[in-house]
Image (cartoon, rainbow, N blue to C red):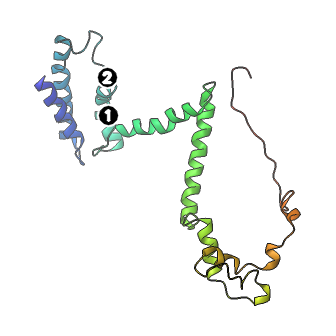
Amino acid sequence: MVRAFAAYLDFCYIVRRPILNEDTLDELDDALKRFHQYRTIFQETGVRGPEGLSLPRQHAMTHYREHIPAFGAPNGLCSSITESKHIKAVKKPWRRSSRFNALGQMLLTNQRLDKLAAAHVNFNHRHMLTGTCLSQLLGGFETAPGTPDDNLSIDNNPGLGTTDPLSTFSSHVPVDAINNDEDEDCGPDEGPTVLNHVLLAKTKGK
């Protein structure tokens, strides 16, 4: 067992080198050959059953020699990256689907998540995610120039203190903006319209 682990570690340390040449690849083949020779001890001692030792990562070791000249040295690349990506790209979208013809739903979920991530980066670059709506609104009123007293709503109201943020907000709001008719807030908003539809999740009954 110690020789099997030693051969396996030799293989791992050789692969982690930033530069590999023909002599290094020959050492890689020798370490892999020794590992296959000594790993049978795990079958002899009953650690592994008679079905063999063809585990996915051990099988991938046989393809390193042909892939390194084609794609370059792995240089410490960890194969666990694919497992982490598998959770985000497969497992979580599967849980969000209806479990019926889920592949199309999973692909659509990943597409929308990518668009949301790109939008988040864009909004953050434009400083649109800094602070809150209320802080932006109050900041705009604090920097606004003063207006005549006849256009202020409750400028002389003694019930509101100067340190109250609501007093700062109300003291810069015109009377017309407060006394608007409530009917104007009802009904559809004027502006361009778009056609839209709702696509329900697929089920076995439909």
Residue 148 image-quadrant placement: bottom right
For badge 1, the amino acid type reads Glu
Provide the residue designation for mark 2: 55
| Quadrant in which the N terminus appears | top left
Residue 70 image-quadrant placement: top left
Q: Nearer the viewer, residue 55 or 137?
A: 137
What residue is shown at x 72% (from left), y 85% (from top)? 156
Depicted 48 relative to depicted 71: above or below: above
Q: Is residue 135 left or right of residue 159?
A: left
Disc 1: CA contacts within 10 A as few (<14), some (14-19) or many (>=20): few
| Quadrant in which the C terminus appears | top right
Provide the residue designation for mark 1: 66
Secondary element at tag 1? helix
What residue is shown at x 34% (from left), y 25% (from top)? 56
View extreme (top): residue:
50
Camera-side mark, 1 or 2: 2
What residue is shown at x 61% (from left), y 71% (from top)? 136
Coordinates of residue 161 in the picture (x, y in percent): 62, 80
Q: Nearer the viewer, residue 190 or 93?
A: 190
Q: Is residue 168 left or right of residue 72?
A: right
Coordinates of residue 170 in the picture (x, y in percent): 70, 77
The residues tagged by marks 1 and 2 sit, at their Cα atoms, a distance apart of 19 Å
Coordinates of residue 204 in the picture (x, y in percent): 69, 20
